[in-house]
Amino acid sequence: MPVLTDLAGQLANAAGTPLPDADREVLSLHLLDTVGATLAGAATPDAQSAFRLLSGGGSVDHAAANCTATRLSEIDDIHLPSGCTPGSIIVPTALTMSAYLKVHDPDRVSAALVAGYEAMTRLAAAIDGQNIVYKGVWTTYLTAPFGAAAVTAALLGLDDERTAHALSIALTSLAGRIGRPGNVRTARWLMVGQAARAGCFAALAAADGFRGDLALLDGDWMAAAHGLQCDPQHFSKAPGSRMVVHDISMKPYCSAKQVVAAIAGFEEILGRGVRPDGIDEVIVSVPGRYAKMIDHGVVEGNRLSSATSAPYQLSLAAYHKPGLFDVARSSYVLTEDITALMEKVHVEADEELGAHLPDRWPARVRVEAGGRSEAATIIEAPGDPGRRFTAGETSAKFTNFTSPVLDTAEVDDWKSLSAGALGNAGALKRLQEKYLSIWEA
């Protein structure tokens, strides 16, 4: 049986099985978390520009705009073992397309979310997404069409055969290579939204009878067409395996995930009574794979340079915590205290820490302060599966990121609807309506 046909059957079987309460609870937390990312991202100038380019194009363009806003927020969830950020594609696609398709059944939308998370992370794992990202391939961009197609196919209620064709058509639109990230007003966010759009379009095409090549993942097509090895074993899961969303991390701050463990370790040390103004040196040790990526300063107007800068992120944690919740980063906080501390932060590679990859992205932080030496090693950061955010922590994160752009009543309404949408049809329908109206504000 072709891999795509088998995968389509697995997704359909999962969709036909009611979600246990524990699974629905975790899925609801990721829905809430991702809606918060959409709202925070939508308030940025880049997202507003993206919507102006895409407005008037119907359901698939609306989905593209919402995925663009969500991913550019840099606060969306991430599946560490495969290196992709699925929630930024799956949740906006599910909420947008279900609204247009008038699917207001929480069970169907839940099934579509599960299908999308599973399809996208399995493809990312099959192509070694956690490693290829350091070779110029943006894993989320590459896998977005596949995930969006799975979501849309589930919402359309396609049978196994048409779902397989939707996934096949989506595969033919894979890109992945976006060039060097971080340019001022980078187009990377637009392109990841367009990748999601391609996946939605693929499912609509399959629903209308168009067909793809169902053998794409059975031979060397991925290697020949994209220069990527693809391990088909990742597309199958043992019956009864828990859904992948249990293994997906949330981020507490607007930071690259490669920096989050370092922030957590530094905050732990500050909590021991170390005064920032007394620090002589900060050594951040991380796996060599991403040491250089986080060892730099910031460039005004370049949002990604701040999210990936360990010196800047740690200095914000010490002197300006609200800066870690600032998605827009329209201007950087570069006070004398912050710039002085940035110069004292040094990043080094530690291959012993690399042993924890790919499931965990660790860091060790050592602080020297007036003859005092303090160290903290963070293997599992806040928001990782072993330190999963509670409902209260997820709600607090939502508030931290949305309160700068929404009034208190709106924040509370969004939270209530998002938290209840997968268990109540009325809440889901109202959430869908509000989600489509984000750009009207």
Image (cartoon, rainbow, N blue to C red):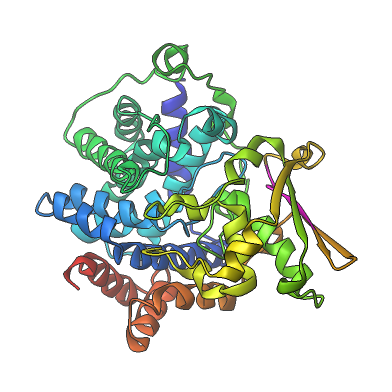
Find residue 200 and report its horizontal and vertical position in percent: 26, 42
Indicate the quadrant where residue 332 lies: bottom left
Q: Which residues are magenta?
A: 359-366
Could you tell me if residue 359 is visible in this image?
yes
Q: Nearer the viewer, residue 199 or 328?
A: 328
Position of residue 232 relative to residue 188, above or below, is above
Could you tell me if residue 17 is visible in this image?
no
Total marks drawn? 0
Query: Does residue 229 appear to the left or right of 264 in the view shown?
Result: left
Indicate the quadrant where residue 62 lies: bottom left
Indicate the quadrant where residue 320 lies: bottom right
Residue that protrudes farthest toward the left in the picture? 56
Find residue 254 and report its horizontal and vertical position in percent: 50, 61
Q: What residue is drawn where x is 76% and y is 69%?
A: 268
Find residue 217 and report its horizontal and vertical position in percent: 45, 20
Query: Does residue 307 appear to the left or right of 414 in the view shown?
Result: right
Query: Does residue 320 appear to the left or right of 102 in the view shown?
Result: right
Position of residue 172 relative to residue 138, above or below, is above
Quadrant placement of the C terminus: bottom left
Q: What residue is drawn where x is 72% and y is 56%?
A: 380
Q: What residue is drawn where x is 48% and y is 38%?
A: 10
Q: Check if residue 212 falls in the magenta segment.
A: no
Position of residue 409 relative to residue 214, above or below, is below
Find residue 105 and report its horizontal and vertical position in percent: 32, 64
